[in-house]
Image (cartoon, helix red, strand yellow):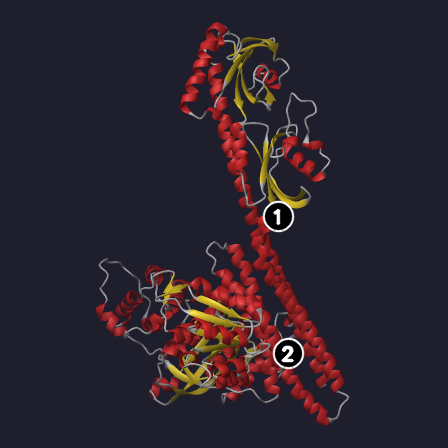
Amino acid sequence: MKTVGNGFYRLVIGATTIVMSLVACGGYGAMQSLILQNLKENALLEVQQGVNDIDQWLITLKTEVESLASTPTIQTMNWALVEPYLKQEITNSGDIVAFSDVFFIFAMVEADGSFYNTKVGRSAKNASHREYFKRAMAGQTTVSDPFIGLETDIPTIAIAAPILSPTTAEPMGDINGNVKLDRLTQVVNQLNYGEGSYAFVLNSKGGAIAHPNRDLLFNVDRPTSPILLNHADPDLATIAKHMVNREQGINLHAIDGKRQYVAYLPLTAADWSVALVIPRQNIERQLLPLNAIALTVVGLTLAMITLLWKVQTFEQRQLKKTKNAAEAANQAKSEFLANISHELRTPLNSILGYAQILRREKNITPKQQKGLDIISQSGEHLLALINDVLDIAKIEARKLTVQPQPTHLLSLLTGVVDIIRVRALQKGLQFYYYPGEPLPQYILVDERRLRQILLNLLGNAVKFTQEGGVTLKVDSASFMQTRSEQSCRLSFEIKDTGVGISTREISRIFQPFEQGEKLYNKLEGTGLGLAISQQIVKLMGSQLQVRSRLKEGSTFSFSLNVEISPLESLSTLQSLDFKSASAVIGYKGERKTILIVDDRWENRSVMASLLEPLGFVLLQAEDGQIGLEKTSCHQPDLIITDLVMPKLDGYAFLQKMRQKGQQSDSIQSIPVIVSSASVSKSDRQASLNAGASDFLPKPIWTSELLMLLRKYLKIEWQYEDKSEPVLARTRRASPLKYALNHEQPTEEVQLTLPPPDEIAPLHHAASMGNITQVEYEAHRLTDLNASYQAFAEKLLNFAQAMDDEAILTLVETCYSAQKPPYTQRIS
């Protein structure tokens, strides 16, 4: 039976790993597509700029020729009158703009094709074969393809407009102005998208009228001019076809023997199209960090499957041994799980680390943010799965323990509520949070384990609820009644309106891998959460209770006897309330030097990418020996080191750092933070025994890293905006003091106020400076009664401005008349 259970255990882990990896890969694909599309659109914008410049130039020229064609002087068709008029136009234009931008010669063509121009007068040649003349006689103003002038021998384009008879409005001939190609060539040469890019222009026949390769240039007077539509290179011919059809886009093609992007857009003022050839790496090099994450996810999946297969093979061999060998195998299993944890946390450090780094980018779009959220959620789910597996292993080995420490209760509850509220909103559920009044501020409890229990129970409630809502109630009746300075009894109740649990299933839900009714087993999860939560609650001296009816919902509850802690240490506050890590942009004071010692380049890269933008001077070493050498040479202000490294591991590195007589006092006093994927209690303690100042588990969370840096480097962070971090808000003076000192608002607004028992939760949140809970209560009051809208909007305006003094003043004013017992709200 145990063998079957272990096989199912591994099957669930393997299946979950594959599914979550596929989800992460899907998120990667969506993210890559969005970023690539954005980069391609930027390339098209570069081409659009060139197209706009050429269009504006040609439209100006066409307008000028059309204006000339409609003047009475031109309509006389008398060259003796027309010639001096046109020459004066050339002189006037040249005085205003650059010569390359205007006409250098004008010609008047009669209906039979004979013509005069401002260079030779009457020409002996005939222009009836010119396409622009034919279209002018059809009543159109046109821009010709480049040709060699009949009288000038200069590569030229002609802007031709019909000269209409004043009486019949029929074309009598045309007036055309010749312009050199300098302006067109200049604009095309300026189009650029990195090294190796170049632009070209095609006419309506597929001939290149501007191209860096002169052998490909087209001329209407040269019968052998190349036509790119017929080019031997099929990709070049395909591009030419798109451009002749006046299409627009950006695609990969094999140009000049290598795959390159080609962005193309048509002109409006002429039957031409402009293209920009861009080397592939110029666009796709910006996808390298995302590709690195994808490779890490693939490697993580393969590593997990390989490790599970090895575990399967290992246990099959162990079944053939004696009882003593079986006991040894159990010990090996525990060690192996620890190794699995280490091997999986290392690539997860890269995944979650770079996800945090990419989130700090200023120009990230909502769609890109969604892709990063998918990657982060997948990585966090895998991390939670690893922790659950280790917890189950500890439970089986009877090694799971709780470690009470001073904990700020309201901060812990607020953090849990923030996480669950987001999950509930994503499913369209209501979430209600009723903190009792008063609750003790500081208690002695295992903060991580209590948060784990609440997240498991609330997460299950959201997961198995399809409509309605989820409620969390926290009360401390004994504390409220006796005001004991020693201990109190905290009660937690989680209620949902979900699928419920039948009576026959209740006895099974606390077993590993059970999720209640088979109808709902298809929901995500391994079924470890309730089993682990029950064991932790038992270690805390209590028992999880459940009341449920099928299809009506469930209620889970438990109570804990906890000691009241008088400690209000700054370090505890920092570790709990430092939530503004994403807003940190630097620190005040002189630059600090940090040495990163880690044999994995990806771990050093993550740490460097997190710290370099904040202004730290970084040194790197791939093993402990090099770390010692760099420490002696540079004497950094702080060191962050791994444990498992070649040559000289982290433990030996720490021992040599702290060895008296071998190192100077200044080097011995350098704070050293151990950052390792080996996160067991024994690893942490061994690090501290070897001389570490603190321990930072991998994957690294930015808020924890910044808290430790502030603690050991004695620095003050600089933030992106002027709002205070949450830490500053939690250490304000008493609510009464702020209520007395804050100025009263001068405007008089008629507000419909909720009754005192509805304001009680709001008053509690305002007293604690809990802006998040104030916003939640404001929305709850609006949903409760529309007449409270003005009151709620006033609260939300103060909350958006982070003005907790104004919030407290407003709430105290409304609440001071009567304060009912808070228990009325939650009883």
Q: Amino acid at mark 2?
A: Phe
Q: At which x and y percent is residue 269?
A: 54, 27
Q: Is residue 735 left or right of residue 551?
A: left
Dot 1 corresponds to which residue?
280
Count residues near mark 1 (Cα–Cα under 10 Å), then give few for <14, some for 14-19, many for 20+: some
Mark 2 or mark 1: name the one nearer the start of the chain: 1
Dot 2 corresponds to which residue?
513
Label number found at residue 236: none
Q: Is residue 206 left or right of residue 790?
A: right
Assign a secondary structure to mark 1. Answer: helix
Name the foreground residue: 259 vs 332: 259
Q: At which x and y percent is residue 199?
A: 58, 37
Image quadrant assignment for residue 666: bottom left
Assign a secondary structure to mark 2. Answer: loop
Image quadrant assignment for residue 567: bottom left
Residue name at image x 29 percent, y 69 percent: 808
